[in-house]
Amino acid sequence: MKWKDLVYQAIIDHCNKKGSRTFSLRNFLDDKIYFFSSLKPNNRHIEEKVRQQLQFLRDSKLINFLDYTGNYTLVASDLLDYEKREVQHIDLSKEKPDRREYIIETYVRKAKWVKMAKQILGYYCIFKNCRNTFIQEDGTPYIEVHHIIPLCHGGEDSMWNLSVLCAHHHRMAHFANKSVKERVQKFLLKEVALRIK
Ligand SMILES: [Zn+2]
Ligand SMILES: [Zn+2]
């Protein structure tokens, strides 16, 4: 197997294991360095080699730079194993309100408010310079619609309260610590207000 394919397969495996498409170079190397050195025992520059392959994978649009701190995101059109599992075993009645809201937003794609938000705000994450997406079977970029103020906290399905986010930033909006969540909420309210004016 070529180095590039090897690294790509290892990334898919790594993402499946941690249950996220987002990964850092550091954690990826920690997870896979022994695997690579066992396959290429004569190579003394594995880390450099892997970094170089990440470049190539980026050029081929198989992974994206997520930010400037060494975080990447896997860009593949297939559902990863953990994502298939996630969709199959959802029992909404057992979820806490915040988590339930996130799940509904993520998997209920036909609702009127989802269509409306995409039509008006577009198909790219509202965070500046965020290109974290992949192309779906129907040819459109993948995007998630988010209620800035959650329905369970009195938010509503109105344009001022809807935003479009990539999977990473959507999780961040729901599951980051309180101060980050508040900053995201402020930013989104402001940004959406500007766009729908
Ligand atoms: Zn949301
Ligand atoms: Zn984003």
Image (cartoon, rainbow, N blue to C red):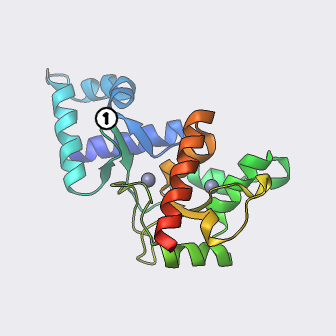
Q: Quadrant of the N terminus?
A: top left
For label 1, the crowd category at 10 Å Cα-Cα, with few meaning under 14, some 14 to 19 and many 20 or more, is few
Counting from the top left corner in percent of width and height, residue 35 is at 33, 27
Counting from the top left corner in percent of width and height, residue 105 is at 65, 61
Residue 182 located left or right of residue 124: right
Residue 17 in sight from this viewpoint: yes
- Dividing the picture into quadrants, the one containing residue 72 is top left
Location of mark 1 (residue): 70
Counting from the top left corner in percent of width and height, residue 183 is at 54, 42
Residue 172 located left or right of residue 25: right
Counting from the top left corner in percent of width and height, residue 58 is at 24, 50
- Position above or below: 179 against 38: below
Residue 71 located left or right of residue 115: left
- Position above or below: 147 against 138: above
Q: Amino acid at mark 1?
A: Gly
Q: Residue at x 67, y 53 (%)?
A: 102
Q: Residue at x 51, y 79 (%)?
A: 119
Name the secondary structure under disc 1: loop
Q: Is mark 1 within 8 Å of ligand 2?
A: no
Residue 8 located left or right of residue 197: left
